[in-house]
Image (cartoon, rainbow, N blue to C red):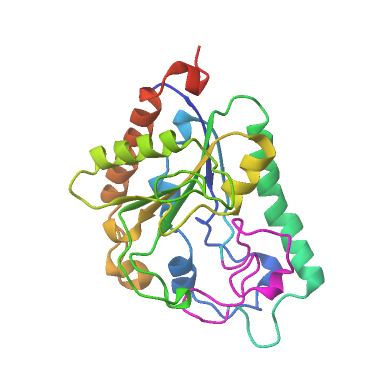
């Protein structure tokens, strides 16, 4: 694949690092970091050589969640930008050691805002025709999600719309519905017989795709791959096992093949290709 596609990749939840600003304050284990984050997305979406731009981070999602809005006081939500608990309800910080307002501002200034500035800078170059916010999802909703524990689809593609990718009465969509449907068909063809490809279910797209679409008008699609397709039980107990790396490489190639097939099928006037 020598062609470089006009895509921006955002991989916001791959990090595993607890930064020095909160060292000694946290109560979480490596297992907590892996369970709540997207530990394999750095390899699943490892096609930065074939796209125009890519943004990612080393910082663990449990410390700074780049896909959350900074508009509200972080300490008001247990699953906000600076988290109080993991997806399993485990406290992130030791008792009495949750960051105060000064430390929260420091964490955001150092790790949150630079990531979003990098995305915005790439989007404003004029070289990006499609941005992809790249994630993985647990096979079932985590305990903190509540509700019925139904199995999740193989892939979830999101643009903030309804189950057909069309706008709802409450808002706009971050990419044309026809694009989302075409990408879903490309994934269904590539992964035929392996599972369902759903639109905006169970996720409709997060802060990154919605905010940056509003700021620039560049189309965004959020991609979620079900971790059940590649994870061994050992990923949750790192000392006893790990993910099959050859499986990850194969999946990465197939994911990019589906995305490239979708893009190549679009008319030139839609993609801005001369």
Q: Is residue 21 above or below residue 167?
A: below
Does the image show residue 1? no
Q: Quadrant of residue 26?
A: bottom right
Per the picture, the main secondary structure of the magenta-coloured stretch is: loop
Viewer-proximal residue, 228 or 265? 265
Q: Is residue 113 left or right of residue 131?
A: right
Task: Tell me which residue sits at (37%, 71%) in the image.
Answer: 236
Part of the protein shown in magenta:
62-91
Task: Tell me which residue sits at (46%, 31%) in the image.
Answer: 49
Let me know if residue 187 is in the magenta part.
no
Viewer-proximal residue, 45 or 172? 172
Q: Residue furthest right?
A: 102
Q: Position of residue 215 (x, y in %)?
A: 69, 40
Q: Position of residue 24 (x, y in %)?
A: 65, 78
Let me know if residue 78 is in the magenta part.
yes
Q: Position of residue 241 (x, y in %)?
A: 30, 67
């Amino acid at each position: 694949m020598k062609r470089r596609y006009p895509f921006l990749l955002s991989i916001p939840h791959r990090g595993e690092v607890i930064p020095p600003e909160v060292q000694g304050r946290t109560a979480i284990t490596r297992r907590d970091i892996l369970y709540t984050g997207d530990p394999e997305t750095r390899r699943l979406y490892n096609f930065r050589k074939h796209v125009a731009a890519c943004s990612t981070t080393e910082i663990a999602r449990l410390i700074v969640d780049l896909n959350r809005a900074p508009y509200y006081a972080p300490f008001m939500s247990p699953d906000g930008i600076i988290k109080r608990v993991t997806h399993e309800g485990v406290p992130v910080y030791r008792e009495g050691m949750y960051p105060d307002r000064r430390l929260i501002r420091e964490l955001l200034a150092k790790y949150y805002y630079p990531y979003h500035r990098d995305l915005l800078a790439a989007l404003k170059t004029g070289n990006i025709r499609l941005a992809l916010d790249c994630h993985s999802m647990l096979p079932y909703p985590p305990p903190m999600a509540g509700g019925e524990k139904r199995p999740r689809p193989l892939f979830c593609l999101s643009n903030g719309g309804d189950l057909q990718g069309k706008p709802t009465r409450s808002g706009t969509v971050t990419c044309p519905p026809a694009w989302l449907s075409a990408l879903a068909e490309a994934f269904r063809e590539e992964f035929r017989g392996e599972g369902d490809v759903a639109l905006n279910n169970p996720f409709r797209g997060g802060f990154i795709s919605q905010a940056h679409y509003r700021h620039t008008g560049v189309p965004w699609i959020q991609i979620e791959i079900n971790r059940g397709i590649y994870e061994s039980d050992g990923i949750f107990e790192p000392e006893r096992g790990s993910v099959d790396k050859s499986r990850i490489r194969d999946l990465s190639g197939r994911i990019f093949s589906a995305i490239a097939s979708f893009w190549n099928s679009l008319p030139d006037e839609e993609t801005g290709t001369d």
